[in-house]
Image (cartoon, rainbow, N blue to C red):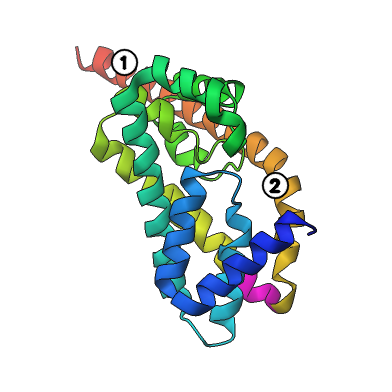
Amino acid sequence: MSGLLDQLATFIQDLIMALGYPGVGLIMLVENVFPPIPSELVMPFAGFVAGQGELSFVGVWVAGTLGSVLGALVLYYIGMVLGDTIVRRLLRRYGKWITVSEADYDRALKFFEKYGAGIVFFGRLLPLVRSLISLPAGAQKMPLPKFLIYTTLGSAIWSGLLGYAGMLLGENWEEVTLFIEQYQELTVIVIAVTLIIVMLWMINRGLRNRSDYADAE
């Protein structure tokens, strides 16, 4: 890491060391609202600290998950209250300050429209859309209970994996960022394959149900 990322990493580390679990949760909340703050600078370091015995892994995991869910809720309600048109207008005017463009929003919206509510879960595991997917979910009025379930599950997996990786790598926790670059492409492939398998399973189940119903008649 260099330059601004180094300064950001130092600030994150100082805040976590000073506040502990609330610091982890707070940074993960902000990271979800402002994507320029990468979660791979937060959870791996928190996992490293847990590995040193200064924090517990479970506490770090819960704090990271809770912060992620709260941050996702902020964007969900922004999308719900402002609506698609105003969100686009704000991104065109101010998106450059948070490094989020209207094209990024369109990408997240296409994912949501194509894969439905399931992408809210899978999107939490995809660095490219994990924060932004909450905006179209809110703008499309996705039911809040369903949004919370999918978001919490996805956030728990993402936070847990990053935290555990940091704990395993120890002082080399920063190497997680190198893996993330490759992981982005791998995740897209895994999600696509998983969705195909699920769709085939649903089609097969539907055909079986029809066959059973026909036999019963």
Nearer-the-camera pick, 167 or 105: 105
* In this view, 80 is above or below 55: above
The quarter of the picture where the C terminus appears is: top left
User: Residue at (75%, 64%) from the top-left corner?
Assistant: 175
Q: Give yes or no for residue 118 being in the magenta stretch.
A: no
Magenta stretch? 165-170
Q: Quadrant of residue 212?
A: top left
Extreme residue toward the bottom, this view: 53
Q: Which residue is mark 2?
A: 183
In the rendered image, residue 171, in percent from the top left (x then y), is placed at 72, 78
Instruction: Report helix, strand or loop for mark 2.
Output: helix
Separation (CA) of disc 2 from disc 1: 40 Å
Mark 1, residue position: 210
Which of disc 1 and disc 2 is earlier in sequence? 2
Left or right of 176, for residue 147: left
* Residue appearing at x 35%, y 50% in the figure: 70
